[in-house]
Image (spheres, rainbow, N blue to C red):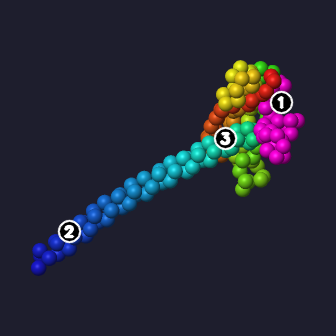
Amino acid sequence: MKSLNKQKGVVLIVSLMILTVLSMVTIASLSGTTMEERMSNNFQQDMVAFQSSESAISIIIDAGDPGGTGAGANPFYSAANDPLVKAMASGLDTVTTTSTLNMDPLDNSNGALTSATVVSYKGVNQLCPGYGAGVHCLKFKISAETSMSGTRVGPTHAQGIERPAPGV
């Protein structure tokens, strides 16, 4: 009878040790999951900011595209609002800040996601590929810097473009 009483205490100690080990494994897995969630959120914010910068550059390129002539012309084009014309009027290698856009369609109050674009005129290229002799290209550099409030995300992207300018 004495040996049975001793075994009851051992079972309690072994079960507490197993419970402690299971608790440690659970805490470790929760810690890993929290870290992965943070990494995923940071990656998502970085991608949103990257796409915002790219969109801001595209907006400038589209605003400066008069299109063709006649039916092919861009009906929304206005030389007075063309950021490329404004940059060219400012002079060679002069930085012209064109706009700061709220790029977050769901946030109209505090502009949590904004992109500031800068256009600079880089001169004339004597040969404009694909347009033949006598057509020069105007060279521009467009940069966009995006900021997202509440984060340290702030990518800057730049893109060079050339526009044909017959008779320049």
* Identity, as a three-letter code, of the amino acid under mark 2: Val
Q: Which mark is residue 86?
A: 1
Mark 2 highlights which residue? 10
In the orientation shown, which residue stands out farthest toward the bottom?
1
Q: What is the quadrant of the N terminus in the image?
A: bottom left
Q: Residues within 10 Å of mark 1 (few under 14, many from 20)?
A: some
* Identity, as a three-letter code, of the amino acid under mark 3: Ser
At 75% from the left and 22% from the top, the residue drawn is: 134
- Label 3 vs 2, first from the N-terminus: 2
* SS under mark 3: helix
| Percent position of residue 25, x then y | 35, 58
Location of residue 58 with respect to 163 vertically, above or below: below
At 23% from the left and 66% from the top, the residue drawn is: 14
Mark 3 highlights which residue? 53
User: Which residues lie in the magenta part?
Assistant: 63-90
Residue 128 figure quarter: top right
In the orientation shown, which residue stands out farthest toward the front?
133
Location of residue 130 with respect to 12 vertically, above or below: above
Q: Please tell me which residue lies in front, 102 or 161.
A: 161
Q: What is the quadrant of the C terminus in the image?
A: top right
* SS under mark 1: helix
Q: Cα distance, mark 2 to mark 1?
A: 85 Å
Q: Is residue 100 shown to the viewer in this render?
A: no
Mark 3 vs mark 2: in front: 3
At 62% from the left and 42% from the top, the residue drawn is: 50
